[in-house]
């Protein structure tokens, strides 16, 4: 066993990080294909505001962050469904409101400290026992919900009207996706930090999309890239003593560059097949 | 492709599948469609024609319950569109030119299979084998050989056939198509209309088609509905006259009906 696992805080970081690395690109695939990847960024800032409230009240910041970002996600989905606000203006409104509240709360508290810095840039090494269990519990819940609602999520993403005409409750599905995203973003904030949450949700998906596979395989590859990026980033961060969040995102970026390069190299060689008849 | 044994084989005449009861609907203050009333019977092949922005697509959305009428009502298979739930009796082929959808990373088989949705199923993610219905549907549109290709790799005409296969995979009684041949070349259009003929005549499916191609539609459809906000005419295709068309499209229309050549 590599020597880094002799410390329980490293083991905890790998468990929490692995879960987050798995579910972030899983939901990210649906968000990217809906052109909603910025929603993760907006919700991360809301979660940050929630975490700061938690710090101020001296209550569990993660649970308050999950609650606040879930409420924001539902409100956002409501506005979108009612066509009250067009997609990205609603996101901008939410993001900057949350950020402004955060800044005000931080100034009330008398400035930055280590905890806040951890939420901004990730602090997976300081994940405690309770936080690991919370991450595992919520992460597994996200995983199971995505699994069970797989068809509904895929179809409402592919074409919402077509999905409705197939008898799918698209509004409800979107609501569930919004809540899952809020939970995922909050868990991810602990690992890579609020500022980099979006990267862990988007980069592995973009990398996977370069491979041009079926939807199932795209989802599987994106999640695998997420997990491997987190593990590799944590390992590098341990041995080189660099920030884990940044290392994770840079590894994911490496995957994206690799798959893009691979696609460039192979696409020149693919011969265009004549359309085959039934066989 | 075979007719589903569970589907009623006999063609009851005088059986109305779709009824528009004086429907009015608009997105803004002005109605997009106003006081539209017509009935589609089982076995009909109805073409909705009209200029751009005349409300054809709006009628389709009202018909599918994607929008609710502001006045009047739409009835499908005897059920009000507002609480319609017999989705498996309907197949819908949306407008083709939707880049958003077509860049989706999905294979031809995955797209068609999604049409088999039968309600919530937690095990859906495990379904690996291509179902018999999907195979039959893909064979019917001549796309079985391309089942493993990504839809984004196909031509517009091929994508259209995949969407038709998706709409047919659960053996619907009514097929609704919104400008299915937009962006499809002449050969593709010919294939498309012969496919539609087969669907209608051999499978007994009622067809409602929104189209720009008046010439072809007048040859293929049994009934034509002329829409320009209001319903200008609704009659058998062979009773549509040049004056109906110039009334509908304005005097600039230079299309001529070549019916008795």
Image (cartoon, rainbow, N blue to C red):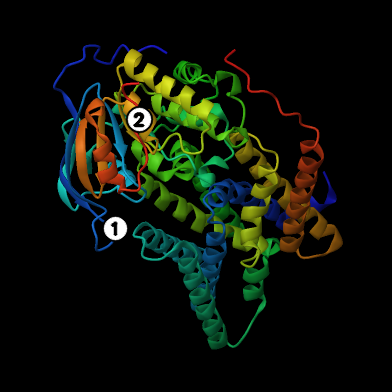
Question: Measuring 36% from the left and 35% from the top, which residue is drawn there?
Answer: B214
Secondary structure beneath dot 1 equals: loop
Report x, y in % for residue B218.
Answer: 32, 29
Would you identify the image quadrant in which residue A196 lies?
bottom right
| Front residue of A71 and A66 | A71
The answer to whether A51 appears left or right of A10 in the picture is left
Count of marks, rendered view: 2
Which quarter of the figure is the C terminus of chain B placed in?
top left
Mark on residue B27? Answer: 1
Question: Measuring 45% from the left and 25% from the top, which residue is drawn there?
Answer: B192
| Front residue of B227 and A212 | B227
The residue singled out by tag 2 in the image is B217
Report x, y in % for residue A204.
Answer: 67, 49
Report x, y in % for residue B190.
Answer: 47, 24
| Front residue of A52 and A263 | A263
Q: What is the CA distance from the residue labelled 1 to the residue labelled 2?
A: 28 Å
Which quarter of the figure is the N terminus of chain B placed in?
top left
Neighbour class for label 1 at 10 Å: few (<14), some, many (≥20)?
A: few
Question: Measuring 51% from the left and 50% from the top, which residue is drawn there?
Answer: A34
Report x, y in % for residue A261.
Answer: 80, 45
Pointer 1 or 2: first along the chain: 1
In this orientation, does residue A29 appear?
yes
Please report contact status of discs 1 and 2: CB closer than 8 Å, yes or no. no
| Front residue of B121 and B88 | B88
Q: Which residue lies most toward the front here?
A: B261
In this orientation, does residue A58 appear?
no
């Amino acid at each position: 066993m590599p020597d880094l696992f002799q410390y329980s805080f490293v083991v905890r970081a790998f468990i929490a990080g692995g879960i987050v690395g798995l579910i972030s690109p899983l939901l990210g695939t649906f968000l990217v294909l809906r052109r909603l990847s910025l929603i993760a960024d907006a919700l991360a800032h809301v979660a940050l505001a929630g975490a700061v409230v938690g710090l101020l009240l001296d209550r569990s910041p993660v649970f308050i962050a999950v609650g606040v970002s879930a409420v924001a996600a539902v409100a956002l989905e409501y506005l979108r469904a009612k066509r009250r606000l067009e997609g990205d203006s609603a996101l901008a409104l939410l993001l900057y409101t949350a950020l402004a509240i955060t800044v005000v709360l931080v100034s009330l508290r008398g400035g930055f400290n280590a905890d806040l810095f951890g939420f901004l840039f990730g602090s997976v090494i300081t994940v405690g026992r309770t936080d690991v269990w919370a991450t595992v519990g919520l992460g597994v819940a996200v995983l199971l919900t995505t699994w069970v609602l797989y068809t509904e999520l895929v179809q409402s993403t592919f074409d919402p009207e077509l999905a409705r005409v197939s008898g799918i409750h698209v509004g409800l599905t979107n609501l569930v996706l919004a809540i899952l995203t809020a939970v995922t973003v909050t868990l991810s904030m602990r690992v890579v930090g609020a500022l980099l949450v979006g990267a862990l949700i988007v980069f592995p998906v973009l990398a996977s999309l370069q491979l041009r596979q079926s939807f199932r395989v795209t989802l599987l590859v994106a999640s695998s890239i997420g997990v491997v990026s987190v593990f590799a980033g944590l390992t590098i961060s341990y041995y080189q003593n660099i920030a884990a969040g940044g290392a994770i995102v840079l590894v994911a970026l490496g995957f994206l560059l690799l798959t893009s390069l691979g696609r460039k190299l192979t696409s020149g060689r693919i011969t265009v097949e004549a359309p085959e008849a039934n066989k | 492709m075979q007719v589903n044994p569970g589907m009623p084989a006999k063609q009851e005449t005088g059986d109305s599948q779709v009824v528009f009861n004086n429907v009015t609907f608009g997105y803004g203050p002005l109605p997009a469609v106003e006081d539209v009333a017509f009935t589609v019977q089982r076995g009909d092949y109805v073409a909705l024609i009209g200029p751009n922005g005349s409300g054809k697509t709006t009628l389709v959305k009202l018909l599918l319950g994607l929008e609710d009428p502001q006045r009047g009502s739409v009835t499908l298979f005897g059920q009000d569109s507002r609480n319609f739930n017999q989705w498996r009796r309907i197949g819908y082929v949306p407008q083709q030119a939707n880049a958003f959808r077509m860049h989706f990373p999905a294979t031809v088989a995955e797209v068609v299979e999604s049409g088999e949705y039968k309600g919530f199923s937690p095990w859906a993610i495990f379904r690996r084998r291509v179902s018999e219905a999907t195979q039959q549907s893909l064979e019917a549109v001549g796309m079985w050989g391309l089942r493993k290709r990504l839809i984004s790799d196909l031509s517009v005409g091929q994508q259209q056939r995949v969407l038709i296969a998706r709409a047919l995979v659960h053996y619907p009684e009514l097929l609704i198509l919104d400008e299915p041949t937009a962006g499809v070349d002449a050969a593709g259009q010919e294939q498309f209309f012969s496919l539609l003929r087969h669907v209608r005549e051999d499978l007994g499916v009622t067809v409602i088609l929104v189209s720009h191609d008046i010439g072809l539609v007048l040859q293929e459809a049994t009934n034509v509905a002329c829409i320009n906000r209001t319903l200008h005419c609704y009659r058998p295709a062979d009773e549509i006259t040049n004056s109906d068309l110039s009334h509908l499209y304005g005097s600039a229309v230079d299309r001529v009906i070549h019916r008795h050549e």
